[in-house]
Amino acid sequence: QVQLVESGGGLVQTGASLRLSCAASGRSPTVMAWFRQAPGKEREFVASLTWNDGTYYTDSVKGRFTISRDNANYTVYLHMKSLKPEDTAVYYCAGSSGFLGGPSTQYDYWGQGTQVTVSS
């Protein structure tokens, strides 16, 4: 059984940077991803990282967010810079046993979420 635990959220000002972490236990999924859900909106895909280091980003975060992995610690990170108020959301870590990343992949494992709030 895979368990995912996010950390690193918080309240920051516009333009700030923040790093989210997702620690995996059990076994590490082949694809790891980040999703977010803002109040009153549907959950949306943010970024994914495959077992062979393929990355996929939603357009609104390209150039600002970077997904990376520390294999030794079974941890995936989401490095966020130039944060905007519209980035405010609960960020969820997700894992898949598949081989392709992106928003259409079926993600079977989910963390509990961490809140990111960007003030203007």
Image (cartoon, rainbow, N blue to C red):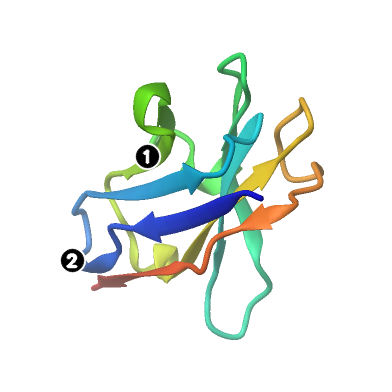
> Which percent across, then down, holds residue 74?
43, 34
Q: CA distance from mark 2 to mark 1?
A: 15 Å
Is 65 drawn above or below residue 35 in the view shown?
A: above
Camera-nearest residue between 61 and 28: 28
> Which percent across, then down, holds residue 78?
39, 43
Is 54 drawn above or below residue 25 in the view shown?
A: above
Is 72 drawn above or below residue 81 in the view shown?
A: above
Q: Amino acid at mark 2?
A: Gln
Q: Amino acid at mark 1?
A: Arg
Q: Residue at x 34, y 50 (%)?
A: 20
Residue 102: name its quadrant.
top right
Q: Residue at x 68, y 73 (%)?
A: 42
Disc 1 marks which residue?
64
Q: Which mark is residue 93?
A: none
Disc 2 marks which residue?
13
Q: Mark 2 or mark 1, which has the lower sequence index?
A: 2
Q: Residue furthest top?
A: 52
Camera-nearest residue between 15 and 80: 80
Q: Residue at x 42, y 46 (%)?
A: 23
